[in-house]
Amino acid sequence: MRRTIDMYKDLHELAKEHHAFYEVLPYNLLLTEKHGSLPATNRTIQAGFDVDIYGLNLKKDLALPGPDPNYTLAHAELQKLAEKVSNAHSKDSCAVEVISFPSRIVLGGSSNADALGMLRIRISHHRGLDRPADLPEQHVLKELEVQLHNLGVVRR
């Protein structure tokens, strides 16, 4: 129980210090279908959601976030949060994974010139690539948003 409290304390402090915010985007797959001699057709399927979490580089430079210990800590703690949310919805066959981008800087923030680090939480499913996201992925997204809100991470 102590570790869970520490996780939230660490993430809450990081979110506040780095002015963390997130955006929700559809996670789309492009499927190419070929049936016999007919020409191939492409079809886009929304297979889930990408929750992109951004944090301000406090040094105000364009250094990559990878070597920053706060970026590493945020990744590790978000991994634990994703596992918690995933375990709560394990019966729904949802996959929740944290993706780091240690070699990427995003320009944005209030001035659109601030250097931001980014982590992504992808919500998808195990029901087959040709199946679109449905209620289970929406429920996981809703739970994840509640958890992020409790940590002080705001949606933009």
Image (cartoon, rainbow, N blue to C red):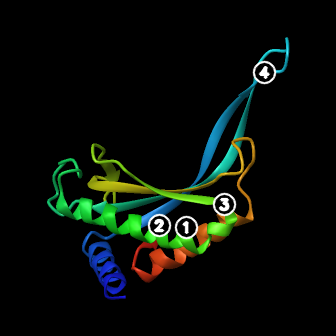
> Considering the numbered disc 3 on the image, is that residue within a helix, a strand or a loop?
loop
* Amino acid at circle 2: Ala
User: Is 72 on the left-hand or right-hand side of 33?
Assistant: left
> Marks 2 and 4, how far apart in space?
36 Å
Quarter occupied by residue 40: top right
Kindly identify the residue that appears in the image at 49 percent across and 61 percent down. 23
Neighbor class of circle 4 (other Cα within 10 Å; few <14, some 14-19, many 20+) is few
**Quick check: marks 1 and 4 in contact, CB under 8 Å?**
no
- The answer to whether residue 25 shows anywhere in this view is yes
* Amino acid at circle 1: Ser
**Quick check: marks 1 and 2 in contact, CB under 8 Å?**
yes
Residue 93: give its label: 3
- Measured as percent of width and height from the top left, residue 10 is found at 28, 77
Which quadrant does the N terminus fall into?
A: bottom left
> Marks 1 and 3, how far apart in space?
9 Å
> Marks 1 and 4, how far apart in space?
34 Å
In terms of sequence position, does the residue under pointer 1 or pointer 3 come before the other? 1
> Considering the numbered disc 4 on the image, is that residue within a helix, a strand or a loop?
loop
Residue 116, relative to residue 80: is it above or below? above
